[in-house]
Image (spheres, rainbow, N blue to C red):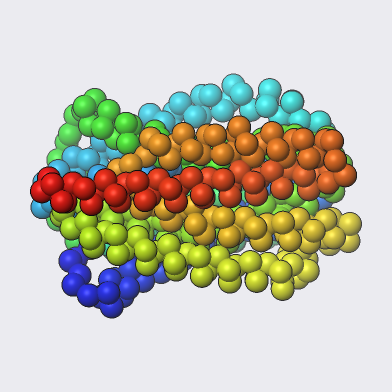
Amino acid sequence: MRETKTIREKVQLLLVVMLPILITQLGLYAMNFFDTTMSGQAGAYDLAGVAIGSSLWLPVFTGLSGVLLAITPMISQSIGAGNREEVPFTVVQGLYVALVLSIVIIIFGGLALEPVLGLMSLEPEVHRIAYQYLIALGFGIIPLFMHTVLRCFIDSLGQTRVTMFITLLALPINIFFNYVLIFGKWGFPELGGVGAGIASTITYWCIFGVTVYFVSRVEPFSIYRIFKTFYGVSFAKWKELLILGLPIGFTIFFETSIFAAVTLLMSEFDTATIAAHQAAINFASFLYMIPLSIAFTLTIAVGYEVGAKRFYDAKQYSKMGIWIAVGMGVVAGLIIFVLREPVSGLYTNDPTVARLIQAFLIYSIFFQLSDAIATPIQGVLRGHKDVNIPFVMALVSFWLIGLPTGYALANYTAFGPFGYWIGLITGLAVCAAALLWRLRVVEERVKVELTQGK
């Protein structure tokens, strides 16, 4: 990152940082996207099994990754304040935390997976595929989370094109192993949806290995000597990271886990409905990478300006980022509306499942509009290190308003499974409105502090 003087310079810098993040996020999610779509071509059971496995994995992954995202504003503010010597110590402590979180989730997941799947009224084959898919993914948790820390370090320096390159390098690896392991090509075993989990794990290890190489050997990352100096465990730094990161992680977890909860509740419907629901969520989540990428960019830019005490510049970045997200949200909604039929064909050859996917996709348009407001604001607030109130807002919006509304509409009205989607839309809209209010409060507080000369 660097200081900018004019609006034009800010827009240019924002786009230079954001576009590689967007491509990176799309590339990372494309792995899940190809897992689901390629498994769907293997059969409805494979689609349902992988989709359910993905819906359970996604909130865990995004929630714990959210904890590690605290590294981004911590490093951005350190660099903005000129405290570069603090950076390698922060990164190493982040790696320690990532390792511990990985071990905890592997142990907990191993104990809880079977009981959780048992709560769902799944057909035996769907149950088997979902279970084995998640077990396969478990072997890639450690490299995935440690890569997340190193990626936050790389992105905090504004070198987002590097993470883009690494992701684009790994994507063909994921597609190749999906192809040979799902369909049993070129002498590999035909594993169906389970093969998608193995392919993802192989890809995670590749991404981590390449990232370590860049951080240790390529400038400007190598000058920080991340792996050259041994740092012992610092519980004080862990505390700082977790105080900032846990609210971020829980905020993301409450938003993403509600989709897993809906999947659990929708298990009372038939396999076609479950598969269609998950396919539509998968595609809508793919487009969600747009506002999410803008949020990551705003955390970097706003954090850098806040660290340098240039609060007016931070506010300018906030406004630009939010308006860009809203514009892209409208475009995403139009894409879904126009392409919903060919999109359904990516996931299934079954006409019944395809019709249901198209119906669910119409509802997902409203997701895009709410996310276009809420998600970038979350990124701005993280740049200010304001994370506790947004956490409470997410909890109330999704779990106390959205989910009960969806349950009531799905079980006591003619909406059926679509009622859950209306509940999700309601939760997202309430959260967007609350976060908009919170942003105004934070910016007013900063204005008062500037007036008082703090």
* Residue at the bottom extreme of this rendering: 8
What residue is rendered at 81% in x and 31% in y? 121
Dividing the picture into quarters, in which one does residue 187 lie?
A: bottom right
In this picture, residue 97 sits left or right of residue 418 = left
Would you place residue 50 above or below residue 388 in this image?
below
Front-most of residues 276 and 421: 421
In this picture, residue 285 sits left or right of residue 221 = right
In this picture, residue 436 sits left or right of residue 50 = left
Name the image quarter holding the C terminus.
top left
Looking at the rendered structure, the number of numbered marks drawn on it comes to 0
What residue is rendered at 67% in x and 52% in y? 281
Name the image quarter holding the N terminus.
bottom left
Dividing the picture into quarters, in which one does residue 246 lie?
A: top left
Q: Position of residue 283 (x, y in %)?
A: 65, 59
Residue 340 appears in view: yes
Residue 96 appears in view: no
What residue is rendered at 56% in x and 28% in y? 109
Q: Position of residue 445 (x, y in %)?
A: 26, 45
Dividing the picture into quarters, in which one does residue 40 lie?
A: bottom right
Would you place residue 89 above or below residue 178 in this image?
above
Q: Position of residue 161 (x, y in %)?
A: 34, 67
Q: Where is residue 266 in the image (x, y as percent from the top left)?
A: 77, 38
Would you place residue 121 above or below residue 387 in this image?
above
Front-most of residues 149 and 437: 437
What residue is rendered at 18% in x and 40% in y? 89
